[in-house]
């Protein structure tokens, strides 16, 4: 019997996954259905119904009484601008909070907003503005000035304030006095070298849930689920967090047709984190918008500078079937994985000081990652995904990559998106389900 149904409304494909409680405290994956996402038809619900119908036909299961949970990226995410005092501190911290919460950061500024920056904000027409800046009880005047300048824009969108706590009420008075909806939360950078991302991320996700209802046909899907509609990237990141809680630090990479997303949950090693120039969040997501095995395939070839593979681009297909098509997609996937993980990973550099040369690290230390997981179509549907992932497990060199003994999993059933969607309602069950998955994989290896 199917008890729980998750629905993922992607930009091109809608997926339905059915689960039941296999034992106390865990879920068993029963069935899956697919359909094209129906944004162009003016109602995403059509694709949802077709995906559920596909699941019913393939499994023979009834879904009428299932507990339904939904995530989506079909509305394209929240357009968001971020404004702090310095790029290295508050602006960067605010951007980290936005990624994974359903936001697309279109502009990041540091310091007092210039006239040209204000013009750019107006041209972007953001769905949400994030104002940050200053450690608690530190810098004040530039932040207050930015609040005044944002209030004068009359954007008619919410402004989320996550800056210096000492002026929180002054910022609210300025914004609300101009009729701006104001959302207040804790400082994203309360102290030097301290990141506080989760409160901001939660408010951005709430804003996403309000925004997503405006996608065609999405409003009626709210009636199907008691948990709201989650952003797909946030669901994957939350799934990765619970996976790490259950079985160890992890890196989850999703290679798609247009983008490659990297999610990591790790604190890194004591050796390298002690040399970091800026703090990194435990849970981090990066999106490489120029790396995709279909829409951005030519860009990958140009980055590689490989004329042989460029000559093979006529074999490119969204769903490869023949061996030449599969070979091309596999090569593109390998290049996307290597490039995306290197961009995500920390870099070791030499810093010359008055007392001599010392090593410093900029970025995320991946050397303590225990699990390397591939999800998405390219890594799960094209043979050789595990070898592609193992090729980047090189440990500490110039880049702080996953270690050579990292364990590799291929998420052929898209577990991270589905289970991440269930994480808010069933966190303990999701952790147990990940443990069961890992135990099954380890038994298969032996």
Image (cartoon, rainbow, N blue to C red):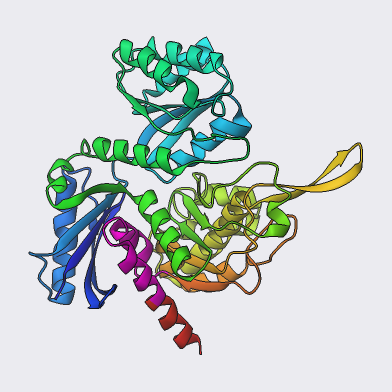
Residue furthest to the left in view is 64
Query: Where is residue 183 shown, x and y percent of the image?
Result: 34, 28
Could you tell me what secondary structure mostly forms the magenta stretch?
helix
Location of residue 150 (image quadrant):
top left
438 relative to 156, above or below: below
Location of residue 366 (image quadrant):
bottom right
Query: Where is residue 90 shown, x and y percent of the image?
Result: 55, 31
Which residue is located at x 36 percent, y 23 percent?
125
Residue furthest to the right in view is 355
Query: Where is residue 242 shown, x and y percent of the image?
Result: 41, 62
- In the image, 168 versus 336, the foreground residue is 168
Residue 105 is covered by the magenta coloring:
no
Location of residue 74 (image quadrant):
top left
Query: Where is residue 341 shown, x and y percent of the image?
Result: 59, 55
- In the image, 365 versus 255, the foreground residue is 365
Quadrant showing the N terminus = bottom left
Span colored in magenta: 411-435
Which residue is located at x 31 percent, y 17 percent?
180
Residue 426 is covered by the magenta coloring:
yes
Lateral position of residue 405 relative to residue 360, left or right: left
Res. 325 in view: no
420 relative to 363, above or below: below
Which residue is located at x 69 percent, y 58 percent?
270
Count of marks, rendered view: 0
Lateral position of residue 326 relative to residue 47, left or right: right
Res. 223 in view: yes
């Amino acid at each position: 019997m199917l008890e729980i149904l998750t629905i993922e409304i992607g930009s091109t494909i809608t997926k339905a996954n059915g689960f039941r409680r296999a034992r106390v405290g865990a879920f068993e994956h029963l069935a899956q259905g697919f359909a094209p996402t129906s944004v162009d038809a003016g109602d995403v619900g059509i694709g949802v119904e077709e995906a559920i119908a596909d699941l019913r036909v393939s499994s023979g299961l009834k879904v009428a009484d299932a507990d339904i949970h939904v995530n989506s990226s079909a509305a394209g995410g929240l357009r968001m601008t971020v404004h702090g005092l310095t790029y290295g501190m508050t602006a960067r911290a605010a951007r980290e909070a936005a990624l994974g919460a359903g936001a697309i950061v279109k502009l990041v500024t540091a310091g007092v907003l210039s006239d040209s920056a204000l013009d750019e904000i107006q041209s972007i027409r953001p769905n949400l503005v994030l104002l940050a800046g200053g450690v608690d009880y530190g810098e004040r005047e530039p932040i207050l000035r930015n609040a005044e300048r944002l209030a004068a824009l009359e954007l008619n969108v919410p402004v989320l304030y996550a800056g210096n706590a000492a002026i929180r009420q002054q910022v609210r008075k300025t914004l609300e006095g101009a009729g701006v909806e104001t959302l207040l939360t804790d400082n994203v950078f309360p102290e030097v070298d301290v990141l506080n991302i989760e409160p901001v991320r939660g408010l951005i996700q709430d804003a996403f849930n309000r925004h997503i209802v405006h996608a065609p046909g999405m409003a009626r899907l709210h009636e199907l689920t008691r948990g709201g509609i989650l952003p797909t990237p946030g669901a994957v990141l939350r799934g990765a967090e619970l996976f790490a809680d259950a079985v160890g630090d992890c890196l989850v990479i999703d290679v798609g047709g247009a983008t490659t997303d990297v999610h990591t949950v790790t604190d890194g090693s004591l050796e390298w984190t002690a040399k970091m120039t800026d703090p990194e969040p435990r849970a981090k997501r990066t999106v490489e918008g120029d790396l995709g095995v279909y829409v951005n395939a030519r860009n990958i070839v140009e980055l590689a500078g490989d004329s042989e593979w460029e000559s093979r681009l006529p074999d490119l297909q969204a769903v490869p079937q023949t061996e030449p098509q599969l070979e091309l997609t596999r090569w593109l996937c390998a290049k996307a994985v290597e490039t995306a993980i290197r961009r995500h990973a920390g870099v070791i550099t030499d810093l010359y000081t008055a007392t001599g040369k010392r090593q410093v690290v900029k970025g995320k230390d991946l050397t303590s990652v225990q699990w390397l997981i591939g999800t998405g179509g390219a890594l799960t549907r094209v043979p050789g995904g595990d070898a592609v992932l193992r090729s980047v497990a090189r440990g500490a060199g110039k880049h702080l990559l996953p270690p050579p003994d990292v364990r590799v999993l291929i998420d052929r059933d898209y577990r991270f998106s589905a289970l991440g969607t269930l994480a808010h309602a069933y966190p303990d069950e999701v952790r147990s389900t990940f443990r069961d998955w890992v135990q099954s994989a380890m038994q298969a290896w032996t």
